[in-house]
Image (tube, helix red, strand yellow):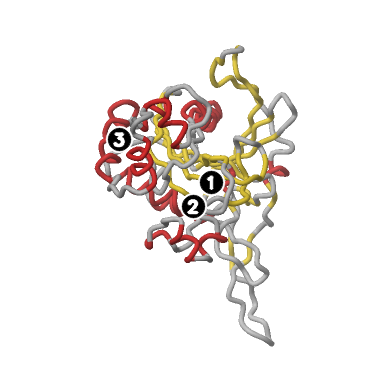
Amino acid sequence: MYVRGLLGPGDRKSVEPLAARVAPDDYAQVHHFVCASCWDPAPLERVLAARAQAMVGGRDAVLIVDDTALLKQGRRSAGVARQYAGAAGKTTNCQTLVSLTLAHDEVPVCVALRLFLPAEWTEDPGRCRAAGVPEERLAYRTKPEIALEELDRLCAAGVTFGCVLADAGYGISATFRQALSARGLTWAVGIPRIQKVFPADVTTHMPAPRPRQGRPRRHPLTSVASTPVEAVLAAARWRRLTWRTGTKGPLSARFAAARVVVADGTQNACGQHLPGEAAWLVGEWRDTGEQKYYLTNHPERTPLRALAAAIKARWSCEHGRTPCVAGQPAWRTSS
């Protein structure tokens, strides 16, 4: 009954108006199911993962990490706080969920949703317990940490994919990128224009001679300084590429790419990051004049068209958005 109410007509999806439409005599039972009943989602998640794998999984599939916002007011619903909501395009009161979507040929299947608890919640255990937050969820975890946990769960369930995609909200995290590489995964993520990188031929060396006074130098020096990505591609050769045909015609933009080494290694005494992993830096110049930047660890000989196609595949998750449902339990909600 609850699922029928979520998928059926009607703007308000909270329990009372939902039950009035699909089960007017069973409001108490529906309310208990949504708000008080305890059931283990793991068996359902395993079935979902297996069916998603059969439908769209494989080496040609992509796993898209993104945020889903549920607009909501009040102080008693778990996780409600002033946060950025993509659906509203601004910072507002909402719940934010980390979503993982398995997609192939623009067909998306949402395989995981996990509620993110802001620090103002985890710093108030009493408030969390009053809202029904499980004890094991009281510790603060970042969105990339939640995404990695769900990714590991899906891989353990047998879900396969060729590339992990994420926007700059996740791509800005060096720890997230490095964790994906440590798992042997190919990834392509958005980054801010101020992200610094080194040329592909950068080298490091220990300074010499040893200083006569003071502590001995412990950090190596780089052969060249790091540079923001927008400066790296400022003089690049941009090519117009079309990645698919939309409802209003071909979707195209200009792209450029350069092989770089990301400045996300250990920090030296001045707080500057040393060279980390080699990657492709990809720039997108849209017809509106807006420029976007991405990093990907695709192989060195990958053509620009393949890099652009992989990056733009992230928009498949927009077709499979979960409706904003007030009152929906979301500790680990699969849709």
- Of callouts 3 and 2, the N-terminal one: 3
Residue 86 visible in image = yes
| Residue placed under numbered mark 2 in the picture | 78
Q: Which residue is at 63% across, 29% downward?
A: 255
Q: Position of residue 147 (x, y in %)?
A: 44, 48
- Give the foreground label among 1 and 2: 2
Q: Secondary structure at mark 3?
A: helix
Q: Which residue is at 39% across, 51% downward?
A: 149
From the viewer's perspective, tell me whether residue 321 is left or right of residue 268.
Answer: left
| Residue placed under numbered mark 3 in the picture | 48
Q: Is residue 7 above or below residue 295?
A: above
Of residues 9 and 335, the one nearer the viewer is 9
Q: Which residue is at 53% across, 60% downward?
A: 121
| Residue placed under numbered mark 1 in the picture | 95
Are the residues at dot 1 and dot 2 in contact (C-beta closer than 8 Å)? yes
Q: Is residue 147 above or below residue 57?
A: below
Of residues 248 and 20, the one nearer the viewer is 20
Q: Is residue 262 above or below residue 66?
A: below
Q: Position of residue 202 (x, y in %)?
A: 60, 54
